Image (cartoon, helix red, strand yellow):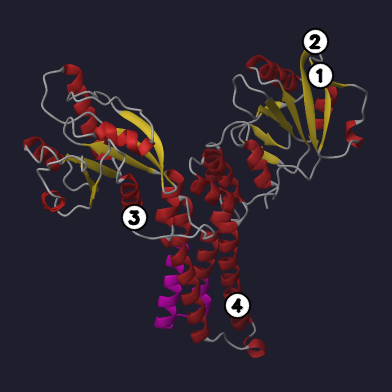
Amino acid sequence: MLACIGERGDLVFGDTIAAIATPLGEGGIGIVRISGDRALKVLERVFRGKRERKWEECPSHTMYYGHVVDPQTGETVDEALVALMRAPHSYTTEDVVEFHCHGGIQAVRKTLAVVLSAGCRLAEPGEFTRRAFLNGRLDLAQAEAVIDVIRASTERGLSLAVQHLGGGLSNRVKGIREEILGLLAAIEAGVDFPDEVGEADATKIIEAVHDIAADLRMLDATAQAGKLYREGIRLVIAGKPNVGKSSLLNALLREKRAIVTDLPGTTRDVIEEVINIKGIPARIMDTAGIRETSDLVERLGVEKTRELLAEADLILLVVDRTTGLNSEDEHIRELVKGRRLLVVLNKMDAQPGKVTKEDVQEWAGGAPLVGVSALHQEGIGALENTIADLVLAGKVYGQDQTLVTRARHQDAIQRAARHLEEVLNGLVAGVAKDILTVDLYGALDALGEVTGETVGEDVLDRIFSDFCIGK
């Protein structure tokens, strides 16, 4: 593992860093975190407890009551608790001190200011977690999972992130790397010491490579679902005016978010919310009804709707069962041609209906269809199930199953699989076994990018720049 001491541009690892670790605003508590070899010296300068202490002798994972003071003026900044975590048993594996202040903006900012003046520098985005990675506490996949835990918007997304943080994906990848290393050892021993150990058996190598490649394909196959649980989807509700788009949004949200009236054209701008569809975070957008209009504001809303339709992962095309299909519906159908579509036949509770499910499904070119009563929230569960089935392609994954959730990981896994395919092709073609080790090492390096063994500084910079400053 890389050491934490070294230089990256103007940033020097090994110095002591500080940052606010909680969101700014009014709250019960605000935390300023510092990490590095001078953490205890800084604590000694800016904190006054009820009695004098030698911080170097204090046990780890203890808290102390006192006041944060400005060492230059002696001014009391805030009443606080200090948490002390000694190296190597801390988040970064360095000495870590946290000031638990009152949650006001000024108290936390002033505490950070005196800490910086006492010998720290402001941390870069993600630098605490980067140090945890560089010092070997986390591998890279685990470090990436930290931000996924923070940003998870559904229980399923959180469960996957926690699984990765605990090493679920890392252990799977490391296991595959160990198998490749075993193959390399057998092949190279046979090449270097043919008389002592004998040449590696080609049939056994083929079987082993087939098994490893199958493991990689299984991991790769989970990526679509994994990225959906992590990143979510964009759902756009579309249809002509007054078909019940806003009622459908309210039904999916289980609250009255959009204004619903009998007047067409009520929704003139996009209303956006995030909902949970069977564990998948979905940005759902209620759009202006698409029709020709002379009203400037409504026309701008219709244009925005057209733009969103082109960006949607799935379009919920709402059709009114009581009015049937007309030229406005035909116009919308042409707009969404070629897009991923789910038809929602609304107002199933009203009688009489002018169209059947079969009529609408044929009109929509065989697109999947669900009948609902948005007003009475009937059929909404079936709609959510259909959405989940469509985006997950009907696949169901258990809570404890390891899923690939990041495009970076999937790319590395696919490259490793391609290297193994080259090994198989070479074996069939009779290529010398020592030549095949080039692709085996290629697969090893590709998988090493997932956990960080073979990743470059540019990748690390890109990953950790996505973190907040205090993490």
Mark 4, Cα crowd under 10 Å, few <14 / some 14-19 / many 20+, is: some
Seen in the picture, residue 264 relative to 195 is either above or below; the reply is: above
Mark 3 or mark 1, which has the lower sequence index?
1
Instruction: Tell me the CA gap for discs 4 and 2.
Output: 68 Å
Mark 4 or mark 2, which has the lower sequence index?
2
Instruction: Tell me the CA gap for discs 3 and 1.
Output: 56 Å
Which disc is residue 389 wearing? 3
Mark 4 or mark 3, which has the lower sequence index?
4
- Residue at the far front in the pictured view: 351
**Which quadrant would residue 119 be assigned to in this image?**
top right
The stretch of residues the image draws in magenta is 415-437
Pair 2/3: label in front:
3
Give the residue number, with chain letter if any, for mark 4. 188
Q: Is residue 58 visible?
A: yes
Q: Amino acid at mark 3?
A: Asp
Q: Are marks 3 and 1 in contact (CB under 8 Å)?
A: no
Mark 1, Cα crowd under 10 Å, few <14 / some 14-19 / many 20+, is: many
Mark 3, Cα crowd under 10 Å, few <14 / some 14-19 / many 20+, is: some
Q: Amino acid at mark 4?
A: Glu
Q: Is residue 414 visible?
A: no
Q: Are marks 4 and 2 in contact (CB under 8 Å)?
A: no
Give the residue number, with chain letter if any, for mark 2. 75
**Which quadrant would residue 99 be assigned to in this image?**
top right
Q: Are marks 1 and 4 in contact (CB under 8 Å)?
A: no
Residue 318, percent from left and from top? 21, 40
Give the residue number, with chain letter if any, for mark 1. 67
